């Protein structure tokens, strides 16, 4: 499966008003593959996909300060039709 998980951040929640939803996907996945997976999983029509690769950072660890690398990640911002919705990104407001 090309979808790994939905990315729930303040920015991604704010973009849901514009019908843009953010997902972490596999690095080798293409836009047509992502579109097919999202349409199949959530029963929505995808209008646009924007992808970006976030390169892994170098970090040092251990007693000898060996160098290690975090793996690369790819995220996809998916725009769907205005009359559709994805329920994973629903946030309920609690009023006081």
Image (cartoon, rainbow, N blue to C red):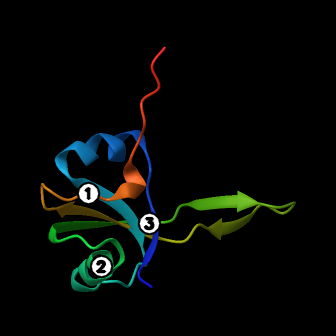
- Residue 21: mark: none
Badge 3 vs badge 1, beta-carbon distance below 8 Å: no
In the image, is 30 to the left or to the right of 75? left
- Tell me which residue sits at (42%, 30%) in the image: 93
* Alpha carbons under labels 3 and 1: distance apart: 30 Å
Report which residue position mark 2 lands on: 34
Coordinates of residue 25 in the picture (x, y in percent): 41, 73
State which mark lies toward you, 1 or 2: 1
Report which residue position mark 3 lands on: 55
- Tell me which residue sits at (18%, 61%) in the image: 79
- Which one is nearer the viewer's eye here, 9 or 73? 9
Residue 51, image quadrant: bottom left
Report which residue position mark 1 lands on: 85
In the image, is 71 to the left or to the right of 68? left
Judged from the image, the secondary structure of the residue bearing numbered disc 2 is helix
Q: Residues within 10 Å of mark 3 (few under 14, many from 20)?
A: few
Coordinates of residue 86 in the picture (x, y in percent): 32, 59
- Tell me which residue sits at (64%, 59%) in the image: 59
Judged from the image, the secondary structure of the residue bearing numbered disc 1 is loop
* Alpha carbons under labels 1 and 2: distance apart: 17 Å
Q: Pick whichever of labels 1 and 2 is earlier in the sequence.
A: 2
Q: Is residue 75 above or below residue 31?
A: above
Q: Residues within 10 Å of mark 1 (few under 14, many from 20)?
A: some
- Which one is nearer the viewer's eye here, 81 or 57? 81
* Alpha carbons under labels 3 and 2: distance apart: 20 Å
Q: Is residue 13 above or below residue 48?
A: above
């Amino acid at each position: 499966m090309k979808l790994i998980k939905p990315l729930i951040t303040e920015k991604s929640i704010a973009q849901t008003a514009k019908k843009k939803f953010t997902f972490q996907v596999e690095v080798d996945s293409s836009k047509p593959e992502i579109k097919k997976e999202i349409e199949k999983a959530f029963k929505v029509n995808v209008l646009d996909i924007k992808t970006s690769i976030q390169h892994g950072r170098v970090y040092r660890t251990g007693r000898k300060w060996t160098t290690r690398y975090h793996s690369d990640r790819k995220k996809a911002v998916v725009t769907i039709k205005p009359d559709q919705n994805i329920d994973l990104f629903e946030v309920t407001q609690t009023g006081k």
